[in-house]
Image: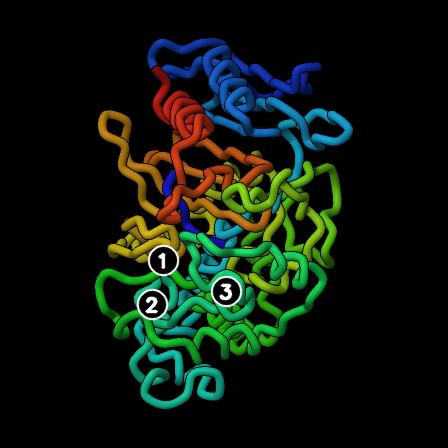
Amino acid sequence: MAVLSVSAGLVTAVPAPNEAGAVLAGSTSPLTGFDPAGLKSAMDGVHRAGMPGVHAEVRDAGQVWRGASGVADVGTGRLIRPDMRQRVGSITKTFTAAAILQQVEKGRIRLDAPIGRYLPRLVPGERGKKITVRMLLNHTSGIAEYLLSAFPSLEKYPSLPDISPKSLDDNRFRHFRPAELIKMGLSAPAVGKPGGSPGVYSNTNYLLLGELLEQVTGTTAEKYITRNVIERAGLQHTAFPAGPRIKGPHPRMYEAFHGLIDPPRDYSVYDMSWVRTGAALVSTMADLNRFYGALLDGKIVKRSSLAQMQRTVPVYAQSGEKIDYGLGLLEVKIPGCGTFWGHDGTVWGAATVSLTRADGRRQMSVAMNLVRWNKLDSSGKPQHHPIDDALSTFRQQALCGD
């Protein structure tokens, strides 16, 4: 849904998870700081801090570590596993952006052409003339977020001081049409001028890109992305959900809504038509690492297209944080560690982060089954929580070692 604020021996096969849910492949490498024991300890720290379940895959060149800590179901105590599937939220946007760039390579779409040329009925008038495909991809279109209309009680998002969870429950099995959601975003006051800087993150942009894909390919965006992005990357456990339920092993996904849903409620069963090509994908952490590795290696789009995807602009995320955003790619610079590319995402009850270092060697994909765990203070600002520190420790270990 949103962007949030977050040489070794070759391992040719990864053993099955042990009873604690961890896979340790390869040995500690002082050169890379790849420390399986340290990774497991840091992940256990996330669980101890209050996260019901967390699982991840970390790669460094030929080494692979997969681990899990905690439970997939707080009611039954069912353990979480590293191979479980997860709703990965806005990580979907990278898949959608790659599909658009493939069509740019074929000459069917021009990045700097006005969207009104392709979708005159959806984006008519001056906006259709001024907003380009590139602006949709990098969130500089000025088009507002539709979520505030689709979920009316989210009017004060992201602070949420007066929110009720009623909208989440009311919409659990509601099937939205893309045009319906796009109209909501276009009807709301603009959040900026087309091409203005900084941009403002909006899911409306990526629903429009889904409609653009359908217009130029003659098939649904989901089918095109599946055949030309997911299958090209060799992903076995990544798909758009066919209904409100996730196929295959997965954890329950708990929404706390900043303490307003107490105890946190499971939203793993949900009709994902409310996000579609913006945030609907289900995947595994292994698949996400495989996807971003292939993308940065020029196997999904051409190198020239990847260079376009990595041209960043400042964008305000829905959290209010300013980020460096390209065409469906988030750039994260960690001093002393390197530049990483990827995305993160949340949907109700699930959060995922996937980052790959620019040289492709170091990768981390991590999933959590509780979101918005920070309670709000009297001003509506999320309070600090021990989970925040534990996640920071794990990400540092996963991306940079000691």
Q: Mark 2, residues whose alpha carbon is within 10 Å: few (<14), some, or many (≥20)?
A: many
Furthest toward the right, the residue is: 76
Q: Mark 3, residues whose alpha carbon is within 10 Å: few (<14), some, or many (≥20)?
A: many
Q: CA distance from mark 3 to mark 2?
A: 22 Å
Q: Is residue 311 left or right of residue 103?
A: left
Mark nearer the viewer, 1 or 3: 3
Q: Mark 1, residues whose alpha carbon is within 10 Å: few (<14), some, or many (≥20)?
A: many
Q: CA distance from mark 1 to mark 3?
A: 21 Å
Instruction: Give 384 or 52, whichever is nearer the viewer.
Output: 384
- Residue at x-position 71% and y-position 50%: 269
Say which label, 2 or 1, has the lower sequence index.
2
**Callout 2 touching callout 1 (CB < 8 Å):** yes
Label 1: element kind: loop
Callout 2, which amino acid? Answer: Arg
* Mark linked to residue 260: none
Residue 287 spot, x, y in % from top left: 57, 39
- Residue at x-position 60% and y-position 24%: 68
Q: Is residue 33 visible?
A: yes
From the image, tell me which residue sits under label 1: 327
Callout 1, which amino acid? Answer: Leu
* Mark linked to residue 147: 3
**Callout 1 touching callout 3 (CB < 8 Å):** no
